[in-house]
Amino acid sequence: MPTVDHLGLGAWRSQVTYSSVKLRMISGHATDDSASAVSTASSEPPTIVKARWGRRKTWVDVTEVVKEAVAKGEVVYANSGFLKVDPTEGRKKQLQITYKLGETEQAANVNEGGKWSKDDYGKPKSE
């Protein structure tokens, strides 16, 4: 049965875990490339393409507020106080962020009351 230190697929007590590793062939030898890929991605802040705050057919552009927070390394909070506008007062809203990490465009959807930070960059976020 695979352990934490052993790569592969394992099941124990109704839990399934999967570990993988990215390998690069150099001169006939496989080297672990996953650690360097992770550190490169996480050290670079994303480029914010656009951000909007609202619901259904009522949205406002909050791109500049999100860009400013990310540039400072701050957490982005999905609330009207942080985003400085309330497009649908008294209604549940969502923050939708489109961003780039390197050349890859990605999206994050954060429900009202949630947050988005550097720990979330590059991970699917839809709460």
Image (tube, helix red, strand yellow):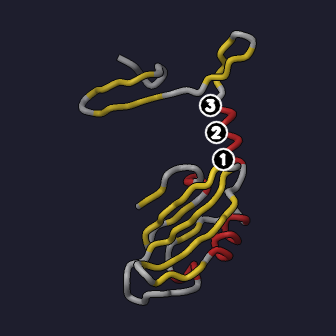
Image quarter where the N terminus lies is top left
Residue 79 at x, y percent in the picture: 50, 77
- Name the quadrant containing residue 91: bottom left
Q: Given contact means CB atoms under 8 Å apart, are the residues at marks 2 and 1 in contact?
A: yes
Relative to residue 86, is residue 117 depicted above or below? above
Q: Amino acid at mark 2?
A: Val
Q: Residue furthest left?
A: 14
Q: Given contact means CB atoms under 8 Å apart, are the residues at marks 2 and 3 in contact?
A: yes
Residue 21 at x, y percent in the picture: 55, 26
Residue 6 at x, y percent in the picture: 46, 19
In what element is the residue under mark 1? helix
Q: Amino acid at mark 1?
A: Ser
Label 1 and label 3: CA atoms lie apart by 12 Å
Q: Amino acid at mark 3?
A: Ser
- Circle number at residue 42: 1
Q: Residue at x 66, y 47 (%)?
A: 42
In what element is the residue under mark 2? helix
Q: Residue furthest bottom?
A: 89
Pointer 2 local density, CA inside 10 Å: few below 14, some 14–19, many at least 20: few
Q: Is residue 10 left or right of residue 5?
A: left
Q: Residue at x 64, y 50 (%)?
A: 104
Q: Earlier in the sequence, mark 1 or mark 3?
A: 3
Q: Residue at x 59, y 71 (%)?
A: 51
In what element is the residue under mark 3? helix
Residue assigned mark 3: 34
Residue 2 at x, y percent in the picture: 39, 19
- Name the quadrant containing residue 49: bottom right
Q: Residue furthest top?
A: 28
Q: Residue at x 33, y 32 (%)?
A: 16
- Circle number at residue 38: 2
Badge count? 3
